[in-house]
Image (cartoon, rainbow, N blue to C red):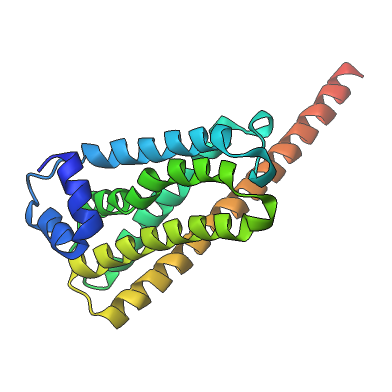
Amino acid sequence: MNLINQSLAILFHPVDSFLFLKKKRGSTNYAPAFILVSLAVILRIASIFIEHFPLAAIAPKDANIWMEIIRIVVPYGLIVVSCYAVTTILDGETLFGEMALAAAYSLLPYIILIVPVTVFSHIVSLQEFSLYSGLHTLIWGWVFVLFFISVQTMNGYSFSKTVGVVLLTALTMAIIVGLALLLFAMTSQALDFFKGVFLELKLLIMD
């Protein structure tokens, strides 16, 4: 099944489609994960330049392309790593590559709708911002539902267990981010300390 057919199947028949991905184990092509995440990044950047100025969250002149890439890629990576870690502990049946592929396919509503919704911003007024914002919320809600279905279906979980896994995934993500920030702060302090010591030694030698 090619990327387009698989994408359409996941949008309209997610349970059967995610089961199909699992059944293909051993012959799965993981390239679509890279393609879909790359498309999400490209369309995110495009939406910044398309969005109507009064409704824009960020002006094109203020946009940092690398930061926009990070805003898509890092959360995606965190979700995949965290969810795989949790499901591994809780008797999950999904391999890491399958988790990465399922999470990428879950981005399909964003990939398909972000540009049309952004174009829609040109025909709504500032007073109708809540409608425009609501459309973004619906897109991400659909993304979440697809990811939830993928976790439940591909791991053979009950609904309640899937809720628990998703909550633990969110907690794991928060812990990873917290540890990363702590490590960054400690590294910065260590660098400042060694820089100070180096400068003092340099001054002593010069004296």
Q: Residue visible at 44% across and 43% down?
A: 116
Horizontal and vertical percent for residue 76? Answer: 41, 49
Q: Quadrant of the N terminus?
A: top left
Q: Residue visible at 61% across and 54% down?
A: 182
Residue 65 appears left or right of 38: right
Residue 99 appears left or right of 109: left
Would residue 92 be visible to someone looking at this image? Answer: no
- In the depicted view, which residue is nearer to us: 127 or 135? 127
Find residue 167 and report its image quarter: bottom left
Horizontal and vertical percent for residue 103? Answer: 31, 53
Q: Quadrant of the C terminus?
A: top right
Question: Where is 47 relative to 79, above or below?
Answer: above
Would residue 137 be visible to someone looking at this image? Answer: yes
Question: Where is 6 relative to 61, above or below?
Answer: below
Outermost residue toward the top?
Answer: 206
- In the depicted view, which residue is nearer to us: 15 or 187? 15
Find residue 14 and report its image quarter: bottom left
